[in-house]
Image: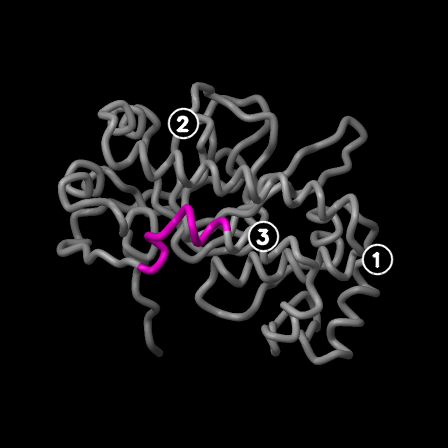
Amino acid sequence: MSVKPQPHPQQNHLLAALSPEVQARLFPHLELVPLPLRALMYESGRAMAHVYFPTDSIVSLQYMMENGASTAILVVGNEGLLGISLFMGGESTPSRSLVQSAGFAYRLPRHLVKEEFNRHGQLLLLMLRYTQALITQMAQTAVCNRHHSIDQQLCRWLLLSMDRLSHNHLTMTQEFIGNMLGVRREGVTQAASKLQQLGAISYSRGLIKVLDRARLEALSCECYGVVKKETDILLPYLTQRQVLKDAAVIPVATLPTRAAGT
């Protein structure tokens, strides 16, 4: 049986875009951590200890209401990082971060990220541009949730997720998707059934596969296109790769399922 190779830092596009000089300062301190499905990365109001750079996982930032209802406000994957509040002046966030697609991430202690950010060099520029891309995604999500159908919202969310993965499938229940979109489970069932009938996706026992991406884009609203265009402009590094010469120097840490952000 073949063994899946360990993820490398350059699978995260932001880390790959850093200059060799910055990589030399940061990469020896990276820790590879597994992100199980539904693992809680950051809890609302709790201090952050690390910044996470996903390689093949997706994390959604969700806002929780007092009655327990939640809605995803953005998704983070291999295009960037989780924990922008640490270098924007805060030590916590009002939202919580939940793993929506299992995989791995590299993490750095917050003090190292702040030290590099305060050099006012390349990392600062990349993170500020990435933050602007996230602001665009959050703003467009708010518009989409208010003005577009559940079908269109599901298309947008699937497309954004696929942009951050190296494969075409996601594993999650309709209840989880409903919590992500802030809609009832029945609405997700109907929307997923429509997309399946149209040949855009297949959905069975919690496994969603995108069969026809072009069809999915045609069925989506303009919100996905707005976010994609702005992201491509702000993050030109998404097409770049830099090779890590010695991945063996990176230690491996174990991430608790419920207390990763403490």
Dot 2 or dot 1, earlier in sequence = 2
Q: Point out the stretch of residues depicted in magenta.
A: 230-239
Residue at 70% across, 52% down:
176
Residue identifier under label 2: 49
User: What kind of element bears circle 1?
Assistant: helix
In the rendering, which numbered label is found on residue 187? Answer: 1
* Three-letter amino acid code at the position of disc 2: Ala
Q: Is residue 174 left or right of residue 241?
A: right
Q: Is residue 26 left or right of residue 35?
A: left
Q: Magenta region's main secondary structure? A: helix
Q: Residue 23 lies in magenta, yes or no?
A: no
User: What kind of element bears circle 2?
Assistant: loop
Residue 37 or residue 90, whichever sits in front: 90
Q: Report the Cα–Cα distance between label 2 and label 1.
A: 37 Å
Establish if 21 lies above or below 210: above
Q: Report the Cα–Cα distance between label 3 and label 2.
A: 33 Å
Q: Report the Cα–Cα distance between label 3 and label 1.
A: 25 Å
Q: Residue 238 lies in magenta, yes or no?
A: yes
Residue 254: percent from left, percent from top: 38, 43
Residue 178 or residue 3, whichever sits in front: 178
Mark 3, other Cα within 10 Å: few <14 / some 14–19 / many ≥20: few
Establish if 101 lies above or below 33: below
Residue 63: percent from left, percent from top: 67, 34
Residue at 55% across, 47% down:
75
Q: Nearer the viewer, mark 3 or mark 1?
A: 3
Q: Quadrant of the N terminus?
A: bottom left
In the rendering, which numbered label is found on residue 226? Answer: 3
